[in-house]
Image: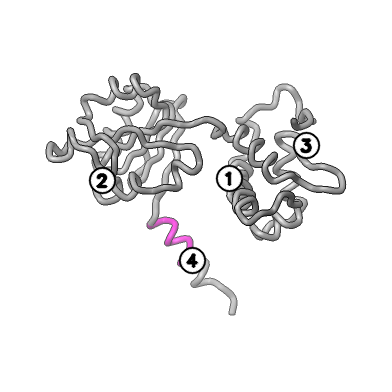
Amino acid sequence: MSAPSDKSPESGPNDVPKAVVSRLSLYLRELQHLLHDGSRTTSSTQLGSLLGLTDAQVRKDLAYFGQFGHPGIGYHCDELVREIKQILGTNHPWPVALVGVGNLGRALLGHRGFSHQGFQVVAAFDVDPTKVGRKIIGIPVYGLDELPRVVKEKGIRLGIVAVPPTSAQEAADRLVAAGVDGVLNFASVTLTLPKNVSTVGVDLAMELEQLAFAVANRRE
């Protein structure tokens, strides 16, 4: 069990920089790789080296949430995995709804990485009558009108939007109206959602632009 954090009682999730939360996911992946390779312990130096960070950055990031290291040992990999999962909220399964079963949607349905990290797409939704009522990669496909019922029955709080940009806002609105609290948006458009709904955008073209910039401006 971790020692209590030295942050003030008023501190909460909203006080933690987004960059720190993003790095927590990176730490989790590396710790899982280390466990898979048979390592039982690690250090801030090793974690930092694996991710191109300093050991001081690793310690500072983890210090937002408590003290997890052991003198003379470093971090127990399995223990730190459990702690980070609890911090991220992935220490329990998350049922997920997917809207849009086109090429991207099908690829997401078959993505095994979701289930490995505690996320399970339990229902998909589409407007195409040739898809509704079928199972695709083992996942039942429903019409959009069934969103409220299915979300309630399956306890879904997270939704994925994988539709064309022109349909993304409507799809997100329907998810929110059905009771979903968080939306992962793969459409290359900014969504306008209530403040109490969390949203994350994944624009693959934008990521490639960032990569192109880095390569184009790399010093020889």
CA distance for labels 3 and 2: 45 Å
Using the rendered view, name the quadrant where residue 10 is placed. top right
| Label 4 vs 2, first from the N-terminus | 2
Locate residue 189, reporting x and y percent.
34, 44
- Percent position of residue 188, x then y: 34, 48
Amino acid type at circle 4 is Phe
Residue receiving disc 1: 25
Residue depth check, mark 4 versus mark 2: number of the one nearer the observer? 2
| Res 164 label | 2
- The residue under label 3 is 67
> What residue lies at 56% left-to-right and 32% top-to-bottom?
91
Q: How far separated are the C-alphas under marks 3 and 1?
A: 18 Å
Is residue 206 magenta-colored?
yes
Q: Which mark is residue 163?
A: none
Q: Amino acid at mark 2?
A: Pro
Q: CA distance from mark 4 to mark 2?
A: 26 Å
The label on residue 213 is 4
